């Protein structure tokens, strides 16, 4: 059965993919849909949702359009989720590959290092990093990447450990290929599938982490983000619930969609494993 | 390896971790924009000259970097986590004041999520493929994707502001002056929402893990034997399957406890719970870096301690672990 067919057989994955496509489209057309800055006051504050057609989701404490904030926030969330996952992969994959391939003392040292990062409470570390480096897009991406790479390193190490005893790798060693090339062209291509699955699931956690940071006021002050919007409505929770409600739903749906799609990807890439789960 | 040796090894490892975090903190202070003295004073640019001179002297900030590091680490060795010039109190005493509330919250959330999670996972596995399974796995999926701070806010609206079932914020009723059992009940009622929302994500995680673990064990030979000799299905899944399936879940739960401490920052902020998470948030708002780094160090210490504790419990619960290690 082809990859696409296997993916499509998983109903959850299809739902996830559909939501994801909608969110991505929403993010792409945000500047056309809402050309004005989402920070601008456009109507009276505390406008309830579904009252005025121009502002279907109402306005927040400063009269900013919530729908516009959601659209612009989608760009921020998706970008940060994707880029910080790439950062985590960039740290985790080489570390895991080196540890797994080199073995011995190098492996020991690198794994201790990984364990150290797994022991530190990751959210607290992310808070400290962003606070110290000042809340900017770069520092947020870096902080999320720094706290998310350990599972990647462990996964890649495990894969490499089992791959390096395979015959084709042994053959490459025998014909004298340089180690770097063996890792790059013989070993790593065969670890791609699990890395893709883990990466797709990590984007969701990265979005959750980013929204938590900006909820605490650690978002980039120039970027409208969903977490910030939830935090901004906190003080008027009782009389204006929608200010915090809609951005939270957006986060929830996006993360849920990513998780569903990631699991579908997992089932499609590891068909044997998937059947065993049912 | 006997228990004492094992403990000594784990303690040594924990101390190395804490030492590394102290070193990390030292470099983080230097990574902050501005003069380290101003960072330590926590008032970027606004601290008076006298204080800055004093700080430079105390931390040897005009000395070589290694000397500075040594002075800084010596502080940690004597349990001196710095001084908050904002609050005019030592960081350690600020943290110790707030620690019991955080321990209560994270402890409750841990127990709730582990209990509820394993129960849900076990039920889903026993009814695998049927509607109970679908309901539980869907719920787990939903919990897993819900932002913690948002669900905390929403539960605040629904359960306390609208329905009035439990108190809205805080640790206990202010001005009520309850004592003894009445006070404990009062605190417990304040604890319900924070502990449930903090534990929600982990409930989902443990439910999924427990389900997978149960299904795996259910295929083992000794389970087939138990079934073949005619034991009741309920008994088999309770005695044979669940008991073995829960072990890996507990291990992972122990490792995950650290994330619970981190999540407490969000929960305590929303519910105005007077723990170290709330302290961290306040320090964040005031840019009081000494307190921020102190809380970071302390929460790492809590994680290290918690991991050692679960290791011990685990070894006591399952003697086979000793034979392996």
Image (cartoon, coloured by chain):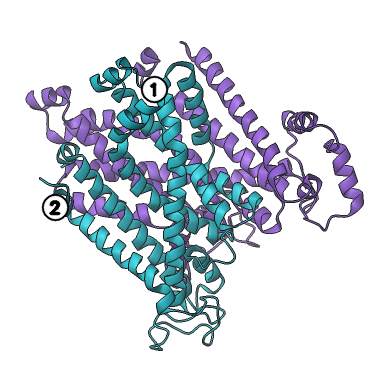
Q: Nearer the viewer, residue A34 or B2?
A: A34
**What residue did someone put label 2 on?**
A9
Mark 1 burial class by Cα count in 10 Å: few <14, some 14-19, many 20+:
few
Asked whether disc 2 touches disc 1, contact meaning CB atoms under 8 Å apart, the reply is no
Q: Is residue A138 left or right of residue A73?
A: right
Q: Colour of chain B?
A: purple
**What residue did someone put label 1 on?**
A178
Residue beneath the point at 52% across and 42% down: A146
The chain carrying label 1 is: A
Residue A68 vertical placement versus B218 (above, below):
below
Q: Is residue B69 left or right of residue A52?
A: right
Q: Quadrant of residue A32?
A: bottom left
Q: Quadrant of residue A195?
A: top left
Residue A206 at least partly seen: yes
Residue beneath the point at 73% across and 38% down: B81
Q: What percent of the width, then of the height, locates residue A76?
A: 47, 63
Distance from disc 2 to disc 1, alpha carbons, whole Å, reads 42 Å
Q: Nearer the viewer, residue B125 or A81?
A: A81
Label 2 or label 1, whichever lies nearer to me, is 1
Give the chain letter for cyan.
A
- Which numbered disc, 2 or 1, marks the residue that appears first in the sequence? 2
Residue B165 at least partly seen: no
Q: What percent of the width, then of the height, locates residue A209?
A: 47, 53
């Amino acid at each position: 059965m082809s990859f696409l067919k296997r993916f499509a057989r998983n109903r959850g994955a299809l739902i996830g993919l559909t939501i994801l496509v909608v969110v991505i489209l929403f993010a792409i057309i945000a500047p056309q849909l809402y050309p004005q800055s989402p920070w601008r006051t456009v109507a009276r504050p505390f406008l309830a949702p579904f009252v005025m057609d121009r502002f279907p989701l109402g306005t927040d404490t400063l009269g900013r359009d919530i729908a516009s904030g959601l659209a612009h926030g989608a760009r921020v969330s998706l970008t940060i989720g994707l880029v910080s996952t790439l950062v985590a992969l960039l740290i985790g994959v080489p570390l895991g590959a080196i540890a797994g391939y080199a073995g011995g003392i190098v492996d020991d040292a690198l794994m201790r290092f990984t364990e150290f990062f797994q022991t530190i409470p990751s959210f607290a570390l992310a808070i400290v990093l962003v606070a110290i480096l000042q809340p900017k897009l770069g520092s947020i991406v870096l902080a999320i990447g720094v706290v998310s790479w350990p599972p990647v390193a462990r996964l890649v190490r495990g894969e490499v450990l089992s791959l390096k005893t395979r015959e084709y790798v042994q053959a490459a060693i025998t014909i004298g290929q340089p180690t770097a090339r063996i890792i790059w062209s013989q070993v790593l291509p065969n670890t791609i599938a699990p890395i893709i699955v883990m990466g797709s699931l990590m984007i969701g956690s990265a979005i959750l982490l980013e929204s938590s940071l900006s909820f605490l006021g650690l978002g980039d002050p120039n970027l409208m983000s969903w977490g910030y919007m939830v935090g901004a409505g906190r003080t008027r929770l009782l009389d204006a619930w929608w200010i915090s409600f809609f951005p939270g739903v957006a986060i929830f749906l996006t993360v849920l969609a990513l998780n569903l799609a990631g699991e579908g990807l997992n089932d499609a890439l590891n068909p044997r494993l998937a059947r065993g789960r049912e | 390896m006997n228990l004492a040796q094992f403990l000594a090894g784990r303690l040594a490892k924990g101390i190395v971790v804490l030492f590394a975090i102290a070193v990390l903190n030292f470099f983080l202070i230097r990574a902050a924009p501005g003069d380290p003295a101003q960072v330590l004073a926590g008032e970027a640019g606004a601290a008076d000259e006298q204080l800055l001179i004093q700080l430079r002297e105390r931390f040897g900030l005009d000395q070589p970097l290694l000397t500075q590091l040594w002075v800084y680490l010596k502080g940690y060795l004597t349990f001196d986590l710095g001084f908050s010039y904002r609050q005019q109190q030592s960081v350690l005493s600020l943290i110790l004041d707030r620690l019991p509330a955080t321990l209560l919250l994270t402890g409750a959330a841990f127990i709730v999520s582990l209990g509820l999670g394993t129960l849900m996972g076990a039920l889903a596995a026993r009814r695998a493929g049927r509607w109970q399974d679908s309901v539980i796995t869907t719920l787990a999926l939903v919990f897993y994707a819900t932002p913690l701070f948002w669900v905390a806010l929403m539960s605040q609206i629904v359960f306390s502001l609208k329905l009035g079932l439990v108190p809205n914020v805080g640790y206990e009723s202010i001005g009520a002056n309850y004592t003894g059992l009445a006070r404990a009940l009062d605190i417990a009622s304040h604890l319900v929402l924070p502990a449930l929302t903090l534990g929600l994500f982990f409930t989902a995680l443990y439910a999924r893990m427990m389900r997978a673990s149960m299904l795996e064990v259910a295929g083992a030979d000794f389970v087939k034997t138990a079934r073949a000799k005619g034991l009741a299905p309920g008994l088999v899944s309770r005695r044979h399957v669940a008991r073995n399936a829960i072990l890996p879940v507990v291990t992972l739960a122990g490792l995950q406890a650290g994330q619970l401490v981190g999540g407490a920052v969000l929960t305590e902020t929303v519910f105005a719970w007077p723990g170290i998470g709330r302290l961290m948030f306040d320090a964040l708002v005031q840019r009081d870096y000494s307190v921020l780094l102190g809380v970071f160090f302390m929460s790492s210490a809590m994680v290290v301690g918690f991991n050692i504790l679960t290791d011990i419990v685990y070894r006591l619960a399952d003697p086979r672990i000793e034979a392996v290690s």
